[in-house]
Image (cartoon, rainbow, N blue to C red):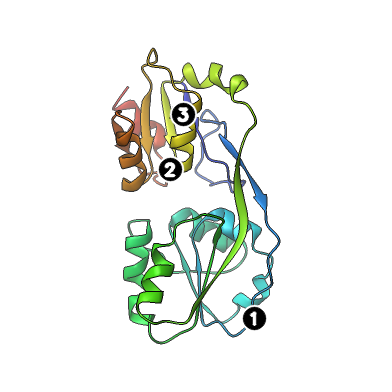
Amino acid sequence: MNIIDTKASDFQMSSKKSYIKNIPLYELKSIEYKSPSDDYTDIVFQSTAAVEFFKDCNILNEKNIYSMGRSTKLSLLQKGFDSKNPDIPGSAGLIKVIENRAKLGKFLIVKGKDGLDEVYQYLKNKKVEVDEVHCYERKKFDSYNNLKGPYLLADAIIFPSTFAVRIFFEEIHSNKTKTKFFGISERIVKSINNYGYEGLLIDYFSGQIEKQIKKFI
């Protein structure tokens, strides 16, 4: 069974199996940003990369910290900070987690350039004091010719982001392949479906990725 994970983050999950090949479709680059003040009461991390590239962890002490999903929560734990995260990863779930705090604090959202803005817009609409920090950006490779071989031979491809879905279908995909496509959230599955292919939802953090995939291959 030939499985490719498109994850670009350097963060490694302890449950990850070595036979799942990690072949990223883009790279992450840090962005210079103005260090935020220490007066934020609530800080939201929207991705593992946001945790990795945020250089001001000193302001996280004694703050309410939130993470978009379990991988981001685990990444924060590796740095010594616990966070609250939704049972179902994504903006909608995170909004439910923070809604009781919405009018009580001053929020900082840590994210990538051109990242999701649903949480930010929700807080702005609630007249909450909120700022954003963009600490990294996603960059496409100059060429994907050297990646076509491994990807077109894959039995299954796991997409942890819609950006990776778009790159794959626009730069690599061939109608001749019989690859199964897996997304780690409903939003990613919908993105796969929008290209005319079946997207299958997978529990990325179960520790049984291969067992889930075998059911469909």
Residue at disc 2, secondary structure: helix
Looking at the image, is mark 2 or mark 3 earlier in the sequence? 2
> Where is residue 62 shown, x and y percent of the image?
56, 82
| Residue 50 in view in this figure | yes
Quadrant for residue 184, please give it. top left
In the picture of the structure, the residue carrying the numbered disc 1 is 37
Residue lying furthest top = 176
> Are the residues flagged by discs 1 and 3 in contact, CB closer than 8 Å?
no
Query: Label 3: few (<14), some or many (≥20) within 10 Å?
Result: few
Looking at the image, is mark 1 or mark 3 earlier in the sequence? 1
In the picture of the structure, the residue carrying the numbered disc 3 is 170
Q: Nearer the viewer, residue 136 or 68?
A: 136
Quadrant for residue 84, please give it. bottom left
In the picture of the structure, the residue carrying the numbered disc 2 is 162
Looking at the image, is mark 1 or mark 2 earlier in the sequence? 1
> Where is residue 201 shown, x and y percent of the image?
31, 40
At label 1, the amino acid type is Ser
Query: Label 2: few (<14), some or many (≥20) within 10 Å?
Result: some
